[in-house]
Amino acid sequence: MTEPTALSIVLTGGATGIGAATVARLEAQGHRVTILDIVQPAVSVGFIQCDLSDPAAIDRAIAQLPSQIDRLINVAGVSNAASDEKILQVNFLSLRYLTEQLVPRIADGGCVVNVASSAGYDWRNRQALIDGLLDTPDFDAGMQWLQANQAAWQANPYKFSKQCAAAYTYRAAGLASQRGVRVNCVNPGSTGTQLTADFKRLVGAEKYAWGVRQIGREGKPDDIAEVIEFLATGNNRWLNGVELIVDGGYIAGLTGGWIDLQQSPKQ
């Protein structure tokens, strides 16, 4: 199947960081990008201001989008510096809500790319619990579940939100698979963005630096953007329901035993 010369792409969180790097790549290819973000992007592309923690705001943004799009890329996310509620709303509930609202508009053979985090790579260890949230039918029911099950996520709401986003990939992959609409996920590792300072405070600057040394360098937004670009526009039409960990090999090191967390500094 030959790709159209210019795709209509909706991308959340495109004003900064990984999202902005992805927009630059897509624009360079000549695609038509519409950014949904609370912050005005510096680049001159389609932009709809949207508070992704608010489903009513998402509905208003959706009403301004074309009746048919080719790709949805969910990059928007907030760090542990935000309130617990906002972390869970933006990093998972809005991602799910927007995906399920827009999949019917995605052209046959199109795709969704979700960005979670390597922080959520171990979601299978808590799958039964995470399935409880994934089983909720909508945004409001999800919030009710979170309020009723605070012990499940209060220790680290950021990690839990990313575990849910990664796990959701497998359910979302079947939303419109009969039309060839695919859903895949990118799990970035340590990447230098505007959120990095928050993560350093969470884990400790020394421990963060130790982790980066194990893989040679910190990731750059474009390291992640090139993988998102491949999933969104590359030749991968048989790829559906896949998580790609893009972290310079850190998770591989933990799994393969050549990175030993026992040697890392304490927080």
Image: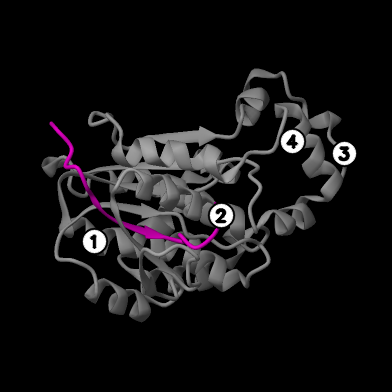
9 in magenta: yes
Left or right, 49 with respect to 197, comes to: left
Where are the magenta residues, as a range? 1-17
* Residue in view at x 54 percent, y 37 percent: 223
| Count of residue discs | 4
SS assignment at label 3? loop
SS assignment at label 4? helix
Q: Residues within 10 Å of mark 4 (few under 14, many from 20)?
A: some
Q: Tell me the amino acid under the disc marked 3.
A: Pro
Q: In 3D space, how far apart are the residues under numbered discs 3 and 4 (Cα atoms)?
A: 12 Å
148 in magenta: no
Left or right, 192 with respect to 165, comes to: right
Q: In 3D space, how far apart are the residues under numbered discs 2 and 4 (Cα atoms)?
A: 18 Å
On the image, numbered disc 2 is attached to which residue? 17
Q: Position of residue 35 (x, y in %)?
A: 38, 64
Q: Tell me the amino acid under the disc marked 4.
A: Val
Q: Tell me the amino acid under the disc marked 2.
A: Gly
In the image, residue 175 above or below residue 235: below
* Residue in view at x 49 percent, y 49 percent: 21
Residue 212 circle label:
4
Q: Tell me the amino acid under the disc marked 1.
A: Leu
N-terminal-most mark, 2 or 1? 2
N-terminal-most mark, 2 or 3? 2
Left or right, 67 with respect to 92, comes to: left
Asked whether the residues under the numbered discs 2 and 3 touch, taking CB atoms below 8 Å apart as contact, a structural biologist would say: no
